[in-house]
Image: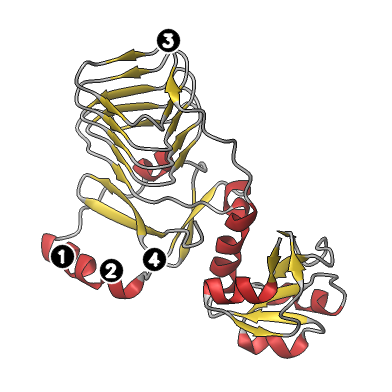
Amino acid sequence: MYALADIANRFGLELRGDATAGIVGVNTLAEAGPDQIGFLANPAYRAQLATTRAAAVVLSDKDAHAATGSVLVSRNPYADFARITALFERREPVTPGIHPSAVVAGDAVIDPNAQVAAHCVIGARSRIAAGAVLGPACVIGEDCVIGPEARLVARVTLVVRVRIGARVLIHPGAVLGAAGHQVRVMAAQVDRRQRAHGALRSHAAGQPMRRHAHAHAALHHRQQTPPADDERRQAAALPQRLQRGVEMVEHGGWTQRFAEDPAR
């Protein structure tokens, strides 16, 4: 359980209302209970502010006057609500170790606190960081890197020279790093609402992209390669645009950026 004041401070939101309210989860305005947080991003649902039972609502300043209870005022209610949901995500604990059926190259480096499940294959010079989980039958090619607390659910293939950053979640059957491409996925966070609609949201473009809810989907994005000077300008501006890290998917020189979850 989190106090509403703690959530407001953690995400830099303005709290108006009961700072001591206990929060145990999140939900929609229509379904939220008195110990949950809801959100309003679409004006079409503004009327539900009058009837919601939510302990607090994440919304913009222009909508705050319509709320009857506590509010968390945000410049981007959709994104901030997505970050708040991560506080209540339940993840299976990591069981460190390498299953006896796994095949691991002699020069691969696996942190003692990583978990490698049955029938995994890990190629030469690949590195698996602490807290990472490789589910059953994952295949990791040569020179790959899997970051801390990343999770490959099952049957995930990283072909060659693929870099997976911290806390990335890749769903079963995904294939990354096909011939001719080098892929880097950094600090992914796909919120539950976006997963349900099969979309990743680009904070750089500000538009949702309809794709399968895993990192492999980004490989099917536009093939155009921006000029090198433009890429350097975007990279230089990145620290000012995102305060708490990014997810980057590089495909043929094109870089997309997604907001990292700052709560974890």
Q: Secondary structure at mark 1?
A: helix
Mark 3 highlights which residue?
A: 100
Q: Is residue 86 left or right of residue 2?
A: left
Q: Is residue 141 left or right of residue 175?
A: left
- Indicate which disc residue 139 carries: none
- Indicate which disc residue 232 carries: 1
Quarter location, residue 104 = top left
Going by the numbered disc 2, the residue's amino acid type is Leu
Q: Is residue 211 left or right of residue 20?
A: left
Q: CA distance from mark 1 to mark 4?
A: 20 Å
Q: Look at 32% across and 24% down and name the residue there.
A: 140
Mark 4 highlights which residue?
A: 244
Q: CA distance from mark 3 to mark 4?
A: 38 Å
Residue 253 spot, x, y in % from top left: 20, 49
Mark 2 highlights which residue?
A: 238
Q: CA distance from mark 3 to mark 2?
A: 43 Å
Q: Secondary structure at mark 2?
A: helix
Residue 7 spot, x, y in % from top left: 61, 71
Closer to the chain start, of discs 1 and 4, is: 1
Q: Is residue 207 above or below residue 254?
A: below
Closer to the chain start, of discs 3 and 4, is: 3
The front one of 16 and 137 is 16
Q: Residue furthest toward the front?
A: 112
Closer to the chain start, of discs 3 and 2, is: 3
